[in-house]
Image: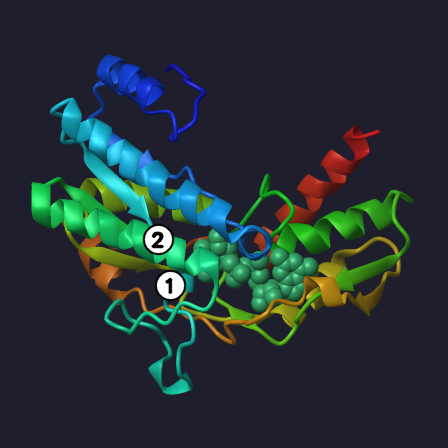
Amino acid sequence: MRLFLGDLADREWLRQVLAEVRPDHVYHLAAQAAVPAAWASPGTTLTNNILGQLNLIEVLLELGLAPRLLVIGSADEYGLVQPHELPIRETNPLRPNNPYAVSKIAQDYLGYQYFLSHHLPIVRVRPFNHIGPRQGPGFVVPDFAKQIAEAEAGKHPPVLRVGNLTARRDFSDVRDIVHAYVLALERGEPGEVYNLGSEQSHSIREVLDTLLALSRVPVGVEPDPSRLRPSEVPELVSDCSRFRARTGWRPTYRFEDSLRDVLNYWRERVAREP
Ligand code: GDD
């Protein structure tokens, strides 16, 4: 196995790497995935996510390569879903309400367009929220777990700063999602799009309460206005029957176990950092 480090904005680098590797499978995961970062710098997220994927596809075409390609969209594409539309099927209208969601719609539809126009075997997925060890700050579970781990280590006051706790999200473990990506690329139908999630939603308050119950020290909670967003998706919960029928995939990790694993990861990381 070889690792090439580079930037998808650099087409010359992409051309060299792809000409050498000549892949028959491509998992295109390189993107800016944090919604707060997209609000802070919409142009960076839009440029990075859309042009990175466009360069990848264009260079594959220039080289005459047609690998199976997995394009990663997002549940956030559905955006302002109406309560009667839950659980969300792939046929739901897309009503994006943040710049990240627009970037993911563009990636999703670029994938579809190149399937239609150039017959590239592109499979698209719309993963719902997923969590696990090594996820960085900027997402709710590591944001909370890091503060708890720092409070336990005496590196942070024992007060956890939080944003909106009323939103509900469909959380899976990243290890289940990675398995789904492999199944999607190997068994998914080119041109098709698949939801990936747990088909259950939890409120952010439940995430907070579960993590606080695992804390080794008492930790208070304080609202942090800087963590609130200009607009918010109230609830996302998936219907994954299309993907299940195609592959038989089902998530295996329990929500509480994933949260515990994330907190343990942050305990180790905080202990290692000065
Ligand atoms: N990040 C963050 N940090 N979110 C917070 C916090 C906090 O301190 N406090 C409350 N929240 C709330 C957010 O307002 C949001 O309603 C919810 O927690 C989840 O936030 P994120 O973890 O940032 O995820 P997201 O739902 O906005 O987006 C995630 O899921 C998408 C798929 O549904 C990301 O993982 C995306 O990359 C992914 O595509």
In the image, taking residue 59 as reference, residue 235 lies left or right, namely: right
Query: Mark 2 packing: few (<14 Cα in 10 Å), some, or many (20+)?
Result: many
Q: Is residue 93 above or below residue 156?
A: below
Labelled disc at residue 73: 2
> Circle 1 sits on which residue?
77
What separation in Å lies between label 1 and label 2 (alpha carbons)? 7 Å
State the image coordinates of residue 7 (x, y, percent, origin top left): 43, 27
Q: Secondary structure at mark 2?
A: loop
From the viewer's side, name the closer residue of 230 and 213: 230
Any part of residue 128 in sight: no
Any part of residue 40 in sight: yes
In the image, taking residue 111 as reference, residue 252 lies left or right, namely: right
Q: Is the C-beta of the residue carrying label 2 under 8 Å from the nearest atom of ligand 1?
A: yes
Q: Is residue 268 above or below residue 260?
A: above
Query: Mark 1 packing: few (<14 Cα in 10 Å), some, or many (20+)?
Result: many
Instruction: Say which amino acid is labelled 2.
Output: Gly
Q: Tell me the residue at 36%/37% (across/down).
A: 52
Q: Tell me the residue at 91%/45% (across/down).
A: 154
Q: Is the C-beta of the residue carrying label 1 under 8 Å from the nearest atom of ligand 1?
A: no
Q: Is residue 60 above or below residue 207?
A: above
Q: Is residue 243 above or below residue 239?
A: above
From the viewer's side, name the closer residue of 220 and 214: 220
Q: Are marks 1 and 2 in contact (CB under 8 Å)?
A: yes
The type of colouring in the image is rainbow
Outermost residue, front side: 43
State the image coordinates of residue 208 (x, y, percent, origin top left): 70, 65
Instruction: Say which amino acid is labelled 1.
Output: Glu
State the image coordinates of residue 273 (x, y, percent, origin top left): 79, 30
